[in-house]
Amino acid sequence: MGNSNSIFTQGFTLLELLVVVAIMGITLAIGVPSLQSFIVDNRLTTSANDMLTALQAARSEATKRVKFAGVSINGNSWEVFVESQDNVVQRYKTATNISVAVEGNSNPIFRPEGRLNSVNVITMTFTSTVGSAQRTLTIAPSGKIKITNP
């Protein structure tokens, strides 16, 4: 009973390690593109929600102060102002790789009763410069704001 000829080895063989690394590589190759798509989608949603917040703030300032208030859009940034563009209340900026296109009046302005100072619908389209994802923000003349995912 003294000596035993069996020797137990501990650890992994090179073959086992290579199989695990190959499986991890395949899993990452499948998962990374969907992760990038998720990040782009999240940035679009964040930028559209930031614009929604800015528009709601402008509408709120207009009704609270009984003055005209709006959002001044300058490329990929915008400012909430009251009465004139010199009286800035808040500033916002889009996420990287996001562009904003505005149809209609580029600076939506709200009247003191909360309605849009325009009879036309204003549409803003947020597009990713990396992919083809979009978000559309629509402002009705009544002042109602809606985000859609086309």
Image: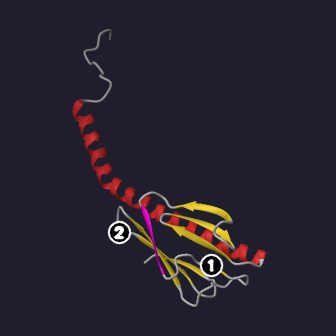
Q: Position of residue 63 (x, y in %)?
A: 75, 78
Q: Residue at x 73, y 82 (%)?
A: 112
- Give the amino acid type for the residue marked by disc 1 in the picture: Ile
Identify which residue is drawn at 35% across, 61% down. 130
Q: Is residue 65 left or right of residue 42?
A: right
The secondary structure making up most of the magenta span is strand
In the image, 127 versus 106, the foreground residue is: 106
Q: Which residues are magenta?
A: 98-103
Hey, what amino acid is under mark 2?
A: Ser
x and y percent of residue 120 in the render?
54, 89
Q: Compared with residue 39, is residue 144 higher up or lower down, i.e. above or below? A: below
Numbered badge on residue 132: 2
Label 2: element kind: loop
Q: Does residue 132 appear to the left or right of 119 in the view shown?
A: left
Mark-to-mark CA distance, 1 and 2: 30 Å
Residue 33 painted magenta: no
Is 10 located above or below residue 146 in the figure?
above
